[in-house]
Amino acid sequence: MQRVLATYDRVAEALSGKWIESGALLLTRLALAQVFWSSGRTKVVDGTWFQIDETQYFLFEEFGLPISPQIMVPMSMYAEFFLPVLVALGLFTRIGAAGLLGMSLVIQFLIFPEAWWPVHSLWAALALVLLSRGGGRFSLDALFIKMRQ
């Protein structure tokens, strides 16, 4: 039994290094960014980058949000484009993750409250990991920190 525990401790130590963590953070960044990037793409006319599909205004009106669809649609569309780019690149990772966490909470409480488990809880968990740990070694944040030293 002692040998099994010692082997387990060695494996756990090897897996808890910065390189493994940075790889996990990279995958976390890409997974979270993909969700919101894909959502942002549904808000624009096919073949364009930022031309909002007019049907979005009607959809947001049906949600009954406290802010006008004329404000919410462009705001959410731009956030769903720019925040995932920041997160995927690991540039201002914590700021991007905080924005995506905020969007997750708005979606959860105001739009689709029935989707907490497993969808919105997963988005929140990914964002919270990035808020607490940052982008890791494989991020522009790490590169800029290294350049400043």
Image: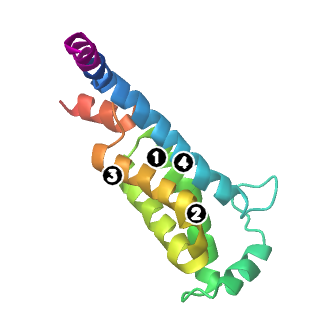
Look at the numbered discs 4 and 1 and tell me whether their residues touch, using CB distance below 8 Å: yes
Indicate which label's residue lies in the foreground, 2 or 4: 4
Give me the disc on residue 87: 1
CB under 8 Å between discs 4 and 3: no
In this rendering, does residue 48 appear at all?
A: yes
Q: Name the residue rendered at 66%, 52% in the picture.
A: 38
Disc number for residue 131: 3
Q: Secondary structure at mark 4?
A: helix
Residues drawn in magenta: 1-10
Residue at mark 2 to residue at mark 1: CA–CA distance? 14 Å
Q: Callout 4 environment at 10 Å: few (<14), some (14 to 19), or many (20+)?
A: many
| Residue position for label 4 | 33
Q: Quickly name the residue at label 2.
A: 78
**In percent of the image, x 24 and y 18: which residue is there?**
5
The residue type indicated by label 4 comes to Ala
Amino acid carrying label 2: it is Tyr
Judged from the image, the secondary structure of the residue bearing numbered disc 3 is helix
Above or below for 10 versus 66: above
- Residue farthest to the right? 46
Q: Is residue 111 left or right of residue 101?
A: right
Seen in the picture, residue 133 relative to 100 is either above or below; the reply is above
The answer to which of marks 2 and 1 sits earlier in the sequence is 2
Mark 2 or 1: the one toward you: 1
Q: Amino acid at mark 1?
A: Val
Q: Residues within 10 Å of mark 3 (few under 14, many from 20)?
A: some
